[in-house]
Amino acid sequence: MSFKKAINIVWLKRDIRSQDHLPLYLAEQSALPYLMIFILEPSVISYPDTSIRHLQFQYHAILKLNLTLKPFNKKVEIFYGEAISVFNEIHQYFDIQNIFSYQESGIKLTYDRDRKIAKFCKQHNIQWKECQRDGIQRAITNRNGWDQKWYSIMHSPIIKNTFSVRENIVLVNNFPIDFDLMNQLEEYPKNFQPAGEEAAWKYLDSFVHERGKNYNKHISKPLESRLSCARISPYLSWGNISVKQVYQYVYNQSKSLSTKYPFTSFLTRLKWHCHFIQKFEVECSYETACINYGYELLEHIPNESFINAWKIGNTGYPLVDACMKCLIETGWLNFRMRAMLVSFFCHHLYQDWIAGVYHLANLFLDYEPGIHYPQFQMQAGTTGVNTIRIYNPVKQSQEHDPQGIFIKKWLPQLINVPTEFIHEPYKMSAMEQELTGIFIGKDYPYPIVDLEISGKVARKNIWSHRTNEIVKQENKRILTTHTRRKVKDINP
């Protein structure tokens, strides 16, 4: 029997960074050499929530991380294969003592994958240390004391990771990235935010010291928010920076600023970020079924022409279409516009939320399952416990893009439409269309629904359904499981 070298493994998933990283810290504390791995899993890649832009961001973040690790003779090894196959392969050549990773609040697919890895570890006497992520608690049945624990974690010391030069682990990677996939990964669209730890800190620093002063003022505006919002969501989603790092940096820096209110609001939303992930950690069925089962009884008739028009930004409502075009091109929208897209799809078009949820998951560069599915259902009105908001896209447009600057940027065919018609170009007379050179029905579509009629139908259907007995019973369960007692939003 040949001797196998004892090693540890650091398995990176949604934590592609070098600092405030407990698994890396544990690996460095051990005397054993360790291998850092990242696995591109075909089953995950082919799942409908994943898009190439997610993979590109992760890949380029790893390239940046490897530059940081190079002076220490370390790198993240990328494998293309199912996780269980990769671990079995490594086990053939090495005596794996420990696997260090973060817990993942993911979809059922990754949960089932982790169960296979746990079984593999038990069979081979491998210790798998899964570290808690961002104050998200595993296996809780209610939210009693959750806020206080979260604040305690946010104020705990940040891990200062250091790296030693150790013996190389020579491993032949029998799971190389597929050639076609590699070609796609190497490309990175210029309109996406740059990936990696350094970029995360640049965005955060500029937000605190310059851009964030108008955070509250511009948070709902589709154009101005692109500058005044923190824009760190992709870095949080893929772990280029930790929630604790962001919290402490903003909290500490804001103490010396004359204007603190925008940053107090930001920190509150940072807690909401974790609050929604905690919901998903407790109930990952948010992805595939109405969290309030009573809403499964509401009938929706699929309308493929509606769905396709919404997906490509061709609904006849300028703000809806401009938002979708912007999202397709850049991967980011502010919260209000995301909510409006979901509301328009589920209420005005009256389509089942499940028919649109993966489309937006694909487009969001900052896709985070724990936020995406609970938020989508909240905006779709299927929780039973949240206020149902049916956004009027014309009103939103008039309030948040009054001059139509954002609209005209993403719908250049409307560039010559006068301001008084930019929110409702279909109201232009034939003569006005002739003068502007924009013909509704040819250059830009007529609205696919009447907002007033569709809004009334949606309100009637959704509000009347709240009296359903199953909905009311589910409300009690949801409130018991997910509701937190009110606490002060910012700890001293």
Image (spheres, grey):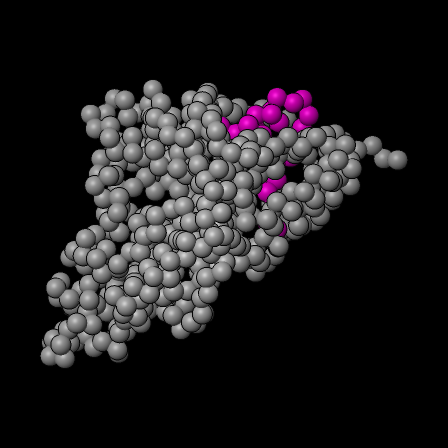
Task: Place residue 34 in its image quadrant.
Answer: top right
**Residue ranking furthest to the right:** 1
Assess whether residue 344 is covered by the magenta stretch: no
Q: Nearer the viewer, residue 354 or 91?
A: 354
Q: Is residue 147 left or right of residue 421?
A: right
Q: Is residue 9 visible?
A: yes
In x, y percent, where is residue 310?
37, 65
Q: Residue at x 31, y 56 (%)?
A: 390
Q: Is residue 292 above or below residue 162?
A: below
Q: Is residue 190 above or below residue 219?
A: below
Q: Residue at x 49, y 60 (%)?
A: 297
Assess whether residue 37 is covered by the magenta stretch: yes
- Which image quadrant: the C terminus? top left
Q: How many marks?
A: 0
Q: Nearer the viewer, residue 193 or 457?
A: 457
- Which image quadrant: the N terminus? top right
Q: Which residues are magenta?
A: 20-41
In x, y percent, where is residue 177?
61, 53
In x, y percent, where is residue 125?
77, 32
In x, y percent, where is residue 190?
37, 53
Q: Residue at x 24, y 49 (%)?
A: 221
Q: Is residue 261 above or below residue 307?
A: above
Q: Is residue 358 visible?
A: no
